[in-house]
Image: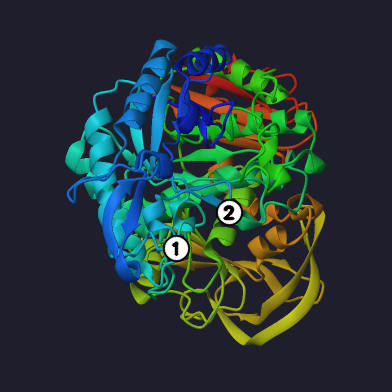
């Protein structure tokens, strides 16, 4: 599949009511304009309320007698799926309009939730549409019919479960969420096995071997083909702490998507991304945010990127747009259909990507971040990715209770906390990896570890909480607080000590490999503070433990706001990107390995990297 660059789409005139006022001529005008600005893909939403407009005709004592069409009031036979074939015809015409303009579609079939409002068939109002048997029956009938009728449309490239369907109704446990997801996906695949199915969810949990978590990332990955993130500058992903054109916020969408892909074990992409209201950022900043998100998505191997959304909705005077000011000004184009800076950015990058390899080569990973049982896994994973990017390494994410983590020469076990820490098979896998010559770095947040003498080469004199210290690393001072172990070394080599002399960074030879130990929660410190990734150089700890990997790379950049990604093309050539995740222009201090030379620059300039922009170059081995 090509890189899916585009936007989420509701018609400009009517928003969520577009299917009740469908106008093929207006749709074609909109498609033409979107295509002119580089939109290649649209994620689109058949409103469930309008496509299955079932209402109940009630009899004596409120007994349900039969289904009727909620608009025409005509009775429907008991075996009817209740799908409105006029709406199907409109959607077919919509597909043709997209195809005429070279646009492909991701179709979110079960769109029952949108922008804070629930849209369900009248017959299901006040029912739990995730767990109720009648709702599940109608859901299955609807999905079968929708896919069966439209599967031959060339414009459709992927089916999507819906829009954040985990917001439609509550679930009591993981089994109810699993059942709904598999019901929808099984119905899709029974009608069409030729297209992938994406999840369409947001705010997923990961497995802690308890059953009440609800919507699990692992289950979405098990059932669906593609996972999705909706990473706005939002508190839902700890991303509302700093301006959204600075490193923490510009890198968080990439980090969250790598987390989803790693834990869910599926390809992933940024399916919704936008910048909310102008109170927290200017139109220029929104364009910068989009610019770096598209470039980062491309080079980090995501399936695509979709902006939220195509059109501003300031002129719409019905719910959900009357409920929230924030939902009204998020488009590529304003209410008069004039392009905003984000539209110009979309066009620029669409044209640039057209000149790059199709498909973009796979990203080279330098190591694996292994998550543990009792931590806030998403937060810690994202912090590790950010620190790694600052240090000059790219990390994959893994989490598994039974030791099924990817093989790697370098592992980071971040922010270890809690009594259990992890199940024995995963710990044994890490210990065996070090024994066989791999490197492991553990960062500490009070976790109850074992094998302290044999594996880490130290003895503990106890745990201290609420400490506050400084440590010097590479000539810079780092402040940290929280928990630490009081350490006496046995076989370990101390690399850094704090101002009181307690070891902060040490390593121990174990078998053929090394285990490093950072004696504070470096990820939590960076992520927990405003400007935490720039105030103190926490990334230097990652750089120290991974220095052999970094020094062997074909390209190095010193600035902590620059992230390097390597995408090998073949044995002799690779694409190297240097992305500026900050709000300042940077004259890059780039060092090219003596075995390589720049063969050509595909995007940007090596002399200056504007804020939230980058360079993509091809490096060739010198023979």
Residue 266 or residue 82, whichever sits in front: 82
Q: Is residue 79 above or below residue 32?
A: below
* Foreground disc of the pair 2, 1: 1
The label shown at residue 382 is 2
SS state under label 2? helix
Q: Is residue 540 above or below residue 618?
A: below
Residue 615 appearing in the image: yes
Q: Pick the quarter of the image with the C terminus.
A: top left
Residue linked to disc 1: 126
Please indicate whether residue 411 sits to the left or right of residue 174 in the image. Answer: right
Residue 408 appearing in the image: no
The tally of labels here is 2
Percent coordinates x, y for residue 66 in the rendering? 26, 55
Percent coordinates x, y for residue 325 in the rendering? 73, 44
Please indicate whether residue 10 sits to the left or right of residue 240 in the image. Answer: left
Q: Pick the quarter of the image with the N terminus.
A: top left
Percent coordinates x, y for residue 314 in the rendering? 70, 33
**Mark 1 Cα within 10 Å, few/some/many (few <14, many 20+)?**
few
Percent coordinates x, y for residue 220 in the rendering? 36, 54
Q: CA distance from mark 2 to mark 1?
A: 38 Å
Q: In the figure, residue 334 lies in which quadrant?
A: top right
**Mark 2 Cα within 10 Å, few/some/many (few <14, many 20+)?**
many
Q: Is residue 233 above or below residue 305?
A: below
């Amino acid at each position: 599949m090509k890189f899916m660059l585009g936007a989420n789409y509701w018609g400009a005139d009517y928003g969520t009511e577009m299917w009740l006022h469908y106008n093929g001529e207006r749709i074609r005008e909109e498609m033409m304009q979107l295509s002119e600005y580089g939109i290649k893909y649209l994620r689109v939403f058949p409103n469930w309320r309008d496509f299955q407009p079932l209402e109940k005709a009630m009899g004596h004592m409120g007994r349900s007698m039969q289904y009727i069409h909620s608009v025409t009031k005509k009775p429907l036979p008991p075996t009817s799926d209740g799908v409105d074939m006029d709406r199907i015809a409109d959607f077919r015409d919509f597909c043709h309009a997209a195809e005429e303009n070279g646009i492909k579609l991701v179709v979110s079939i079960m769109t029952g939730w949108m922008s804070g409002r629930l849209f369900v068939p009248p017959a299901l109002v006040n029912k739990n549409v995730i767990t109720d048997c009648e709702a599940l029956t109608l859901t299955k009938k609807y999905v079968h019919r929708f896919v069966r009728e439209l599967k031959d449309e060339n414009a459709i490239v992927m089916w999507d479960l819906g829009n954040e369907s985990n917001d439609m109704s509550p679930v009591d446990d993981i089994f109810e969420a699993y059942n709904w997801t598999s019901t929808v996906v099984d119905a899709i695949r029974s009608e069409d096995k030729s297209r992938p199915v994406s999840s369409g969810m947001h705010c997923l949990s990961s497995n802690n071997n308890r059953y009440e978590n609800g919507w699990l990332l692992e289950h979405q990955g098990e059932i669906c083909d593609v996972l999705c993130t909706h990473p706005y500058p939002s508190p839902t992903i700890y991303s509302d702490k700093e301006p959204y054109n600075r490193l923490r916020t510009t890198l968080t969408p990439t980090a969250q998507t790598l987390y989803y892909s790693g834990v869910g074990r599926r390809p992933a992409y940024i399916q919704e991304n936008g910048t909310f209201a102008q109170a927290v950022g200017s139109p220029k900043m929104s364009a910068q945010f989009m610019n770096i998100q598209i470039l980062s998505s491309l080079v980090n191997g995501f399936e695509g990127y979709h902006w939220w959304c195509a059109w501003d909705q300031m002129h719409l005077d019905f719910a959900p747009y009357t409920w929230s000011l924030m939902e009204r000004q998020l488009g590529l184009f304003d209410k008069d259909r004039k392009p905003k800076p984000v539209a110009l950015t979309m066009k620029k990058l669409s044209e640039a990507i057209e000149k790059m390899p199709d498909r973009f080569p796979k990203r080279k990973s330098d190591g694996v971040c292994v998550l543990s049982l009792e931590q806030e896994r998403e937060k810690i994973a994202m912090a590790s990715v950010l620190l790694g990017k600052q240090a000059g390494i790219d990390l994959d994410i893994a989490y598994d209770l039974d030791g099924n983590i990817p093989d790697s020469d370098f592992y980071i076990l971040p922010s270890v906390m809690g009594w259990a820490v992890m199940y024995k098979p995963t710990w044994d896998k890490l210990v065996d990896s070090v024994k066989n010559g791999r490197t492991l770095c553990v960062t500490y947040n009070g976790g109850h570890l074992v094998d302290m003498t044999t594996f880490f080469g130290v003895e503990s004199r106890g745990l201290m909480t609420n400490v506050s210290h400084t440590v010097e690393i590479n000539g810079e001072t780092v402040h940290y607080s929280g928990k630490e172990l009081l350490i006496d070394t046995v076989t370990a080599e101390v690399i850094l000590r704090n101002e009181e002399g307690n070891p902060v960074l040490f390593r121990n030879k174990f078998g053929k490999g090394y285990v490093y130990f950072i004696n504070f929660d470096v990820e939590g410190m960076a992520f927990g503070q405003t400007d935490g990734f720039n105030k103190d150089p926490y990334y230097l700890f990652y750089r120290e433990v991974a220095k052999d990997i970094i020094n062997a790379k074909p390209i190095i950049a010193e600035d902590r706001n620059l992230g390097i990604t390597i995408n090998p093309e073949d044995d002799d050539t690779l694409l190297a990107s240097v992305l500026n995740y900050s709000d300042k222009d940077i004259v890059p201090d780039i060092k090219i390995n003596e075995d390589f030379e720049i063969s050509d620059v595909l995007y940007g300039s090596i002399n200056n990297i504007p804020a939230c922009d980058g360079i993509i170059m091809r490096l060739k081995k010198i023979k």
